[in-house]
Image (spheres, grey):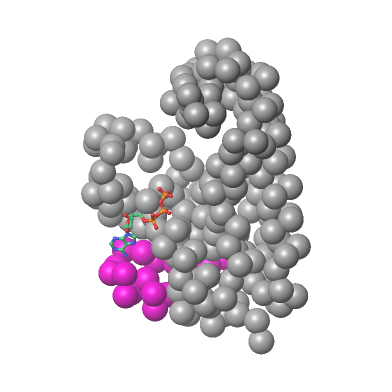
Amino acid sequence: GVRRVGLTGGIASGKTTVADLLAERGALLIDSDVLAREVVEPGTPGLAALVERFGPGVLTADGHLDRPALGRLVFGADEAARSARRDLEAVVHPAVRARAAELEASAGLDQVVVHVIPLLVETGRSGSFDLVVVVDVDPAVQRTRLLARGGLDPEQADARIAAQASRADRLAVADVVVDNNGTADDLARHVDDLWERIRPR
Ligand code: ATP
């Protein structure tokens, strides 16, 4: 049976929408982006480790992680940025894995656990799931939806898309492809088909 599902897709492909539909049908969701924020909340060992490594400049006045400030240290092609990025990942990734394992242990015995992992392909983890589901959109649709969501200009949107694994690389690891080129109703029907295939019986 299918117990652990890895769900991925490009930026603005519809991962969150698909994940929410699966949760409505009874799946336990484990979203690595959500966990990555949790493990550096105020009071966590993760945030303390980041302050130790990067200094109090990565804190806002009220003691939260200052993401733009951290971003200025870790985004870049020079060695200092690369090294900062490695150190950041060395704090966040193990904490996220530990929290994911804890959540997974809380799942019902025959509950389907869906791991939402935007960088599943980029991080080479597609082998650790019973089933890899890829939410797929045509690049033109993806770009339109990414821009419609706001916050990025066309150049930034294209750069975000180009920085990710290609559509072909993603499709190559997919056991199931969920097409999200249509309407929200179309998508819900595709998710029903997927759920029929993976639901506990
Ligand atoms: P991100 O990579 O940024 O986390 P995501 O893959 O989780 O994004 P969603 O947030 O689910 O994608 O969807 C991206 C955007 O596209 C959202 O604004 C969502 O409302 C919209 N969207 C998703 N599916 C459809 C659809 N079938 N028709 C129209 N808009 C859609």
- Work out whether 25 lies above or below 65: below
For the residue pair 138 and 84, the one nearer the viewer reads as 84
Residue depicted at x 53% and y 22%: 58
Q: Quadrant of the N terminus?
A: bottom right
Across and down, in percent, residue 91 comes to 68, 32
| Magenta residues (range) | 175-190
For the residue pair 41 and 25, the one nearer the viewer reads as 41
Extreme residue in the bottom direction: 201
Residue depicted at x 41% and y 63%: 17
Across and down, in percent, residue 86 comes to 64, 25
Across and down, in percent, residue 25 comes to 52, 77
Task: State yes or no: residue 187 in magenta.
Answer: yes
Task: State yes or no: residue 138 in magenta.
Answer: no
Residue 91 in view of the camera: yes
Q: How many marks?
A: 0
- Work out whether 48 lies above or below 104: above
Residue 74 in view of the camera: no
Q: Is residue 179 left or right of residue 96?
A: left
Q: Is residue 86 left or right of residue 12?
A: right
